[in-house]
Each structure stands twice: as C-alpha cells, then as structure tokens.
Amino acid sequence: CATPTPTARTPTMQMLTSAGTWTRPEGVKLVKVSLVSGGGSGGVANGQSEGASGGGGGSGASATKFINVEGISSEPVSVGASGSGGGAGGTSSFGAHVSCTGGAAGSGGNTSTSGQPGTGGSCTGGDLTFIGFKGSGSVGASLLPYGLGGAAGNESAGTPATGYGAGGGGGSGSSNGIPGGAGGGGFVLVEEY
C-alpha cells in the first residue's frame, strides 16, 4: 500500500495587545515571538509667566526570539502599556524567554529649564534586539516601523504617539501643568509553526 504523505501544519499567529496567557495549539513545535514595549509619556510644562516645554518621551524597544515549544503548554504574556501622565512605558515579555522594558518619560520643564527627553527601553533574551530611542528635545522618539513619536505642544499639550511603542511629545506653554502626550502601547506577536 502507498505510504501516507505527511501534511505540513499551516502556520498561525496570535497578536496580543493586552496581558494574558499564550496556549500552545496542537501540533505547534516552534514559535517566533516578536515584541515591542510601551513608549514613555512626554513631560509636563510648568511655564507660569513664560514659555516652558517638557521633554519628549523615549521609545520602547523591540526583540525577536525563536523558541522550541514542544515541551511547553502555555506561557504568561505581558504587554507594555503606554506611558501617560508623566509615566514610563510598560514592559512586554513572553514568559521568561524574552523581555523588553518601556521607554522613560520626558521630564517636566519650567521657565528656566527645559525638560529632558526620556531614554529608550532595552531588551534581554532576544535572538535579535533593538534598543529604544531617546526623545529629541520635546519631540517623542519614534520606533519605526511600528510607531511615530508625538510632536511637541505649541502653547498646548504634547501630541500622543501614533502606532506602537513610540514616545509622546512634551507639553509647552506659559501656564502650569500643561501635560505631555501619551506614548504608544506595546504588543506581542506569536507566529506558530
């Protein structure tokens, strides 16, 4: 009789934008995990009687990791939240295999000193990793191709980042408490083979 021809498994993927648990589908032996951490918030402006600007938020970082999952049934997944309200971006991770920290927030500025831009995130455990970028003045750092940094405010709040992992723009103006824009959130993409 004829020998049966083995059938290859059709690759699948799961895109996670919030924390949860990855469960290995039947027949999956290898996964490629790509992740991005959250971008930091732009800094607040406290201009009082003169113009001031907060620093731009730093971007998250990104990593790729190939993992043999034949002996694994599930893994916890964390997804970095966007930095907001002057906070840093959150960490994204896949179990204990790979993790990236979020970008730092820009610092606040006042009438005599402009805020400093936030630094980028970093990763551990990846087969391929890219550190995040520092904000540029009051402009949030981009994390291409995933997200664009927010623009600095013009007598207004900083602009939020667009897409994933970028930093928010710093606030600017002549009154107290002009906020920076929020950073972009992260993601974890699991390609299953």
Image (tube, helix red, strand yellow):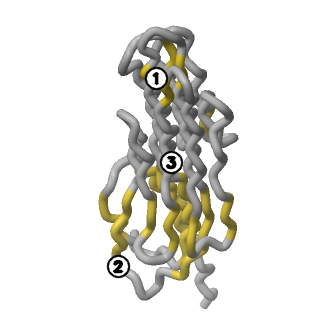
Residue at the bottom extreme, as displayed: 1
Mark 2 Cα shell of 10 Å, populated few (<14), some (14-19), many (≥20): few
**Residue 183: image location, x then y, percent:** 48, 36
Q: Residue at x 59, y 33 (%)?
A: 140
Where does label 1 land, which residue? 45
Secondary structure type for disc 2:
loop
Where does label 3 land, which residue? 104
Looking at the rendered structure, the kind of residue marked 1 is: Ala
Q: Is residue 192 visible?
A: yes
Q: Residue at x 60, y 73 (%)?
A: 66
Sequence order check: which comes first, mark 2 or mark 1? 1
**Residue 136: image location, x then y, percent:** 68, 35
**Residue 18: image location, x then y, percent:** 35, 49
Where does label 2 land, which residue? 73
Find the distance from the CA under tag 3 to the CA under tag 2. 34 Å
Which residue is more in the foreground, 89 or 24?
89
Vertical comparison of 46 with 29: above or below: above
Secondary structure type for disc 3:
loop
Sequence order check: which comes first, mark 3 or mark 2? 2
Find the distance from the CA under tag 3 to the CA under tag 1. 17 Å
Which residue is more in the foreground, 115 or 162?
115
Mark 1 Cα shell of 10 Å, populated few (<14), some (14-19), many (≥20): many
Mark 3 Cα shell of 10 Å, populated few (<14), some (14-19), many (≥20): many
| Quadrant of the frame with the C terminus | bottom right
Which mark is in front, 3 or 2?
3
Asked if the residue under mark 1 is in contact with the one under mark 3, i.e. CB atoms within 8 Å, the reply is no
**Residue 62: image location, x then y, percent:** 60, 56
| Quadrant of the frame with the N terminus | bottom right
